[in-house]
Image (spheres, rainbow, N blue to C red):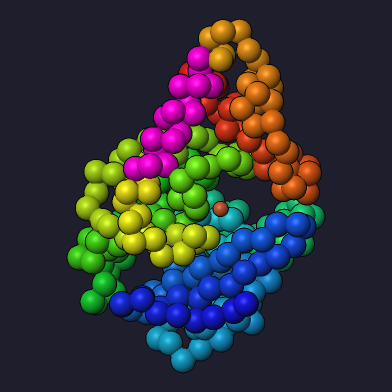
Amino acid sequence: MVSTKSYPGVEYYECKVDALTTSLLVYIYWLDGILIDSGPFRLQKGIDQFCSGKRLDKIVHTHFHEDHTGNTGYLSQKYHVPAYIAPLYIEKCRKAARLPLYRQVFWGKRPAFDPLPLPDVIDNGNTRLKVIPAPGHTEDHVVFLDENEGRLFTGDLYVHYTTKVIMRQENMPVLMDSLRRLLGEDFATIFCSHAGIVENGYELLRRKLEYLEELQDRVLSLHKQGLEIKEIYQKLFPKKMPIQYASNGEWSPYHIVRSLVEDRQS
Ligand SMILES: [Fe+2]
């Protein structure tokens, strides 16, 4: 299923990706000549069609993951436009990504591209996006706030308000701090890379923080009772998900528990 849709002031590309007994929706957003993330390489044909006929001035990225940067090399060369990403992984982006096989199967490769560091504000004439660091999912993750319209482009910060599985490198306490800071900003609707446009987005980000705080309390109380990280994980998340097997453990609820406990110990 591939489609191009529009929301007042924003056009977006939507596509469902199926592989390895998992399916995920992907959303790419365009507003006022700005493409927010370039999507996975596997969807290049559809994303190229989405961009053709539009004014394209620049590609900005929420973070370096291959499902957000997979077509940047291709699009920035074809349309002669600059790409921007947070400085932390610029060097990493300049080389083709070395990905585990399951990620290559799911998203495709991520060719090299040559990004510039994101400025504090992206000003495109009629649109002004404030770049706000929002680490946790990755260290380089940012979100884009359109203060005039009350919109927040959230990349992979949200995805769902009851997070049950994360990648090994994710850090839940850091993500919770990002949520706390963002809830001090003025916005209503969020534009998520996998959940789409969420009109009660502010409320759901608040609910996500609440869910994680409650989970943190349960995890820390079990740890205080003497349970090891693995025991807490088995108790709170007894049912294994297909992605855990497919990713050889790179995706697991275990990483949620570990990051919550390690934060307490540090
Ligand atoms: Fe991601």
Q: For this view, does 29 lie left or right of residue 109? A: left
Q: Find residue 145 and report its image quarter.
A: bottom left
Instruction: Give x and y (percent) for residue 9.
Output: 31, 77
Examine the rendering and report whether any part of residue 118 can be seen.
Answer: no
Q: Find residue 23 and report its image quarter.
A: bottom right
Q: Where is 166 relative to 153, above or below?
A: above
Considering depth in this image, is 65 or 121 the residue closer to the camera?
65
Main secondary structure of the magenta stretch:
helix
Q: For this view, does 192 lie left or right of residue 247? A: left
Q: For this view, does 62 lie left or right of residue 133? A: right
Q: Where is 1 relative to 54, above or below?
A: above
**Residue under the point 58% across and 56% down:** 65
Is 214 magenta? The answer is yes
For the N terminus, give its image quadrant.
Answer: bottom right
Instruction: Give x and y (percent) for residue 241.
Output: 71, 43
Examine the rendering and report whether any part of residue 46 can be seen.
Answer: yes
**Residue under the point 69% across and 25% down:** 234
Instruction: Give x and y (percent) for residue 29.
Output: 44, 71
Q: Where is 147 relative to 180, above or below?
A: below
**Residue under the point 49% across and 50% down:** 160
Instruction: Give x and y (percent) for residue 209.
Output: 39, 38
Q: Which residues are magenta?
A: 206-221
